[in-house]
Amino acid sequence: MAETLGSLADKISIIQLKIFHMREQLARPDADEAHKAACAAKLEVMAEQCSDLETEAGTLLAAYAAGTARPKIYRQFKMYNDPKYRAQPAKQAGK
């Protein structure tokens, strides 16, 4: 499984924000019916995506609790702004 609980929580929060704003579009009094129908169709897709992500998060959490899966920790190895990783200028011959 490539996802972590953190990445799933991030995706769920993003899709929930999209759902919130799409519902606002459905409630707009100035929107025409074609716009509202398109928004309603998108809302159905987003609701399914959110449900899938929530199911995946629950499955992963259950696997962690059962001991059948362990979270994999990816360490950050940053090389920028560290002088020991900077190449020294080549010395010119004869100097």
Image (cartoon, grey):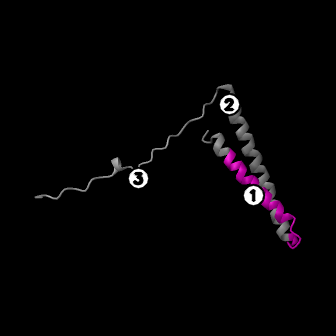
State which tag comes first along the sequence, 1 or 2: 1
**Image vertical order of residue 59 relative to residue 78, above or below:** above
State which tag comes first along the sequence, 2 or 3: 2
Q: Position of residue 45 (x, y in %)?
A: 77, 55
Residue at x 81%, y 63% (from the top left corner): 39
Residue that carries the numbered disc 1 in the rendered image: 18
Residue that carries the numbered disc 2 in the rendered image: 63
Label 2 secondary element: helix
Q: Position of residue 2 (x, y in %)?
A: 60, 41
Q: Residues within 10 Å of mark 1 (few under 14, many from 20)?
A: some
Residue that carries the numbered disc 3 in the rendered image: 81
**Image vertical order of residue 76 relative to residue 70, above or below:** below
Q: Mark 2 and mark 1 in contact (Cβ < 8 Å)?
A: no
Residue at x 30%, y 52% (from the top left corner): 87
Quadrant (top left, top right, bottom left, bottom right) of the C terminus: bottom left
Label 1 – label 3 distance at C-alpha: 37 Å
Q: Which residues are magenta?
A: 9-33
Q: Amino acid at mark 3?
A: Asn
Q: Position of residue 26 (x, y in %)?
A: 85, 64
Q: Amino acid at mark 1?
A: Lys
Q: Amino acid at mark 2?
A: Ala
> Position of 74 compared to 14: left or right?
left
Q: Main secondary structure of the magenta part?
A: helix
Residue at x 65%, y 26% (from the top left corner): 67
Given residues 36 and 27, the one toward you in this image is: 27
